[in-house]
Image (tube, helix red, strand yellow):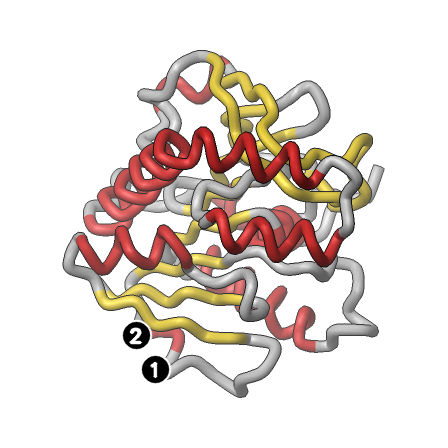
Amino acid sequence: MRILSVVHGPLVRSELFGDVARAEGHEVAEWSIAHESGPPRAVEEYDAVFVFGGHMNVDQESEHPWLRAEDELVRGLVERKVPLLGVCLGGQLLAKAAGAHVGPSPEREAGFVRAELTEQAAGDPIFGSLPREFDVFAVHEYAFHVPDGAVELARSSVCSQAFRLGECAWALQFHPEVRLEQVEAWLREDMLPNSDEIVAELRDRLDEWQAFGARLCRAFLAVAEHPRGSGLSRSTTDLTPTKVP
């Protein structure tokens, strides 16, 4: 497959997911949407899309005008039923495109947090085989609500951690793609008071966390190669904005 990886800066690239996809024999092209006018190929030529994180928020369109173009991009991908996986900012962009509220999280999550699958996750091709409870590595100040018509897959005590929109679009609030050096750079910029403890725990658990991330990535790639079902219902592809609560 040809995979487009939409990135938002040098510290938020494809990372582990790019390695896994290439190892599985796929072609991965990165597009820095904030700095480049377009991807290497026309968007329509890609079979699947990753949308990764960034330090900006979805409501900062005046500061980052390219967010408007990215909103249109995500809407178009969903409407054309292109397999899509959004991580952190990418997941929030998917939620926003589908009309859900995205805003400041009730609490900031940084480091490993406990997540729990929902009952609806049982039949999901990516989350269905995960344990009922598991830890996820998160670094975010904003969080998404689950769009109408979407299926919530996992949540922490603070916010939703994952949902599926239709049959081939997933949003993750956590970061299964990270490398240690990447997180160290993030936390240096954020100057969190407990950054040393967060980095130390990630270092200790890095192998298991990257194995988890690789498993999620491979599951998404398998769905992207062999989509299930015949299409999405109107309720899951209608991107008319809903009222913000």
- The kind of secondary structure element at disc 2 is helix
Residue at x 79% of width, y 59% of height: 59
Residue found at x 31% / y 21%: 129
Q: Is residue 5 above or below residue 228?
A: below
- What amino acid type is highlighted by mark number 1? Arg
Q: Which residue is mark 1?
A: 41
Find out whether the residues at labels 2 and 1 contact each other: C-beta distance under 8 Å: yes
Residue 192 spot, x, y in % from top left: 77, 44
Percent position of residue 58, x then y = 72, 58
Q: Can the viewer see residue 239 in this picture? A: no
Q: Does residue 197 appear to the left or right of 178 in the view shown? A: right
Task: Write down the residue under mark 2.
Answer: 45
Q: Secondary structure at mark 1?
A: loop
The residue closer to the viewer here, 119 or 107, is 107
Residue 130 pos. (x, y %): 37, 21
* C-alpha distance separating marks 2 and 1: 7 Å
Residue 31 or residue 68, whichever sits in front: 31
| The image quarter in which residue 60 lies | bottom right
Identify which residue, 147 or 84, lies in the foreground: 84
- Name the foreground residue: 228 vs 220: 220
Which quadrant, please, contains the C terminus? top right
Can the viewer see residue 228?
A: yes
